[in-house]
Image (spheres, rainbow, N blue to C red):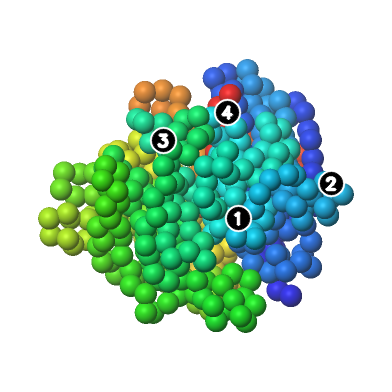
Amino acid sequence: MSTPYRGGLAPVTDEITAFDLKVTGRIPAELNGRYLRNGPNPLSLDDPSASHLFLGEGMVHGVRLRDGRAEWYRNRWVRNADVARRLGEEPRPGRTHGGMDFAANTHVIGLAGRTFATVEAGSLPYELGYELDTIGPCDFDGGLPGGFAAHTHLDPATGELHAMAYFFGWDHHQHVVLDAKGAVTRTRDIPIADAPMMHDFALTERFVVLYDLPVTFSMAHAEKGAPLPYAWNEEHGSRLGLLSRRTGEVRWFEVNPCWVFHTLNAYDDGDQVVVDVVRYPKRFVDARLEGGGSPTLDRWRIDLSSGRVSETRLDDRAQEFPRMDERLTGRPYRYGYTVATSDLVEMVYPPDRAMEDLPDEAFDNTLIKHDLERGTQQGRRFGRDAYVGEPVFVESGEAEDAGYVMVFVNDPARGAADLVILSAQDFTGEPVATVHLPARVPLGFHGSWVSD
Ligand SMILES: [Fe+2]
């Protein structure tokens, strides 16, 4: 069986606990909390779950920082019932939705002093303890009608956490809002045909922005036993929905066919709504991740009066994993952070595509800081086999880029990962601190800085 879990994506086989990690540089004393990151890490490469990048069992890696020290590193599988059994443990109690019990592998977030590993497409999130042990599946005290979502967006003004849930058995997508205490305060079903995948969405002060794009659930692929039965659907249009946060009404706007996994940010601009995303020309041919073009940083401008949407390319380099200063989620903003790497490009392209086909210099394990006001970028390169992951911004001052960018970077010389802490204002300078971990951290998906 071919597996995408090679190179930087090769799974680790051990759960490690290490204390008092070696540090180069100085960890800022104000960083008290945990840097957490989730990703697929199949228990065995012989498992069906190892056939698709999206289906490997989740493993969360965490580094705890306190008073200028790196107190610990831990990596733990998310124990759904199957993982628990295979590790010789009792399954955790809790309900499932739609018969799905998945070891959530996509994101890990802090909410109301709790920690959640999240995933989309019908499964519940798994709650983790502070030290990443699995507590169990969580439906927020019964508040969640179905599954949850991998990506969420927190409104910095109201403290509300927004999510869009979807499930192949539904004829709608579901907007879910939680309060700062982690209670579901409202849900709204939005009818959408063909059960499209909706990996992310955007939030502005007035709207929730929905991506109804032509990657839809495919019964034909499900019957053929495709591990991920979603396919590009020529019959399904491409449109953006503006769900009014005030009235709950949705207005739809047509866009050119494309695919989007991730939002950088969005905001209201008078009679327009600006939505910045990493956009692909096409995705998921025959239920496989497929090229069809590079993922570029693009801007949609939705004009509420004309009903038209214009497109602008902000950066044509292949890049992914956009993050920004989340104090400005849904607000006008200036800076964004993405990653452009050969490893990540390989991750989103089919494994049989030769890396030599790809333009080289643009993808050399580079983090990009975007200045969207000036239209400029700064690139920070990490060298071959660095397996640079998602750049997480952590604020430490008033200015939008006053803070740090945290990222796991593989050190090929040591065969282990570092947690690199950059100054966002000195993006290409020496790292503020480099925490040396005792083991590899495979390339994965998303993470968070969870302040204590
Ligand atoms: Fe994602």
First in residue order: circle 2 vs circle 1: 2
Q: Quadrant of residue 327?
A: top left
Residue 255 placement (x, y as % from top left): 28, 66
Mark sitting on residue 160: 3
Question: Which is more toward the observer, 52 or 96?
Answer: 96
Q: Nearer the viewer, residue 171 or 209?
A: 171
Q: Residue at x 35, y 45 (%)?
A: 203
Label whose residue precedes the other's in the sequence (1 or 3): 1
Per the image, label 3 sits on a secondary structure element best described as: loop
Please report the residue visible at 28 percent of the width from the left and 55 percent of the height from the top.
250
Q: Can you give x and y, in whole percent of width and height, for residue 187 in the image?
A: 42, 47
Residue flagged by tag 1: what amino acid is it?
A: His
* Cβ–Cβ under 8 Å for marks 1 and 3: no
The answer to whether residue 420 shows anywhere in this view is: no
The 10 Å Cα crowd at callout 3, few under 14, some 14 to 19, many 20 or more, is many
Q: Amino acid type of disc 3?
A: Glu
Structural distance between the alpha carbons of marks 4 and 1:
24 Å
Q: Is residue 47 left or right of residue 23?
A: right
Residue at numbered disc 2: 89
Q: In terms of depth relative to the viewer, which is nearer, 146 or 447? A: 146
Query: Could you say whether the residue bearing mark 1 is in a helix, strand or loop?
Result: loop
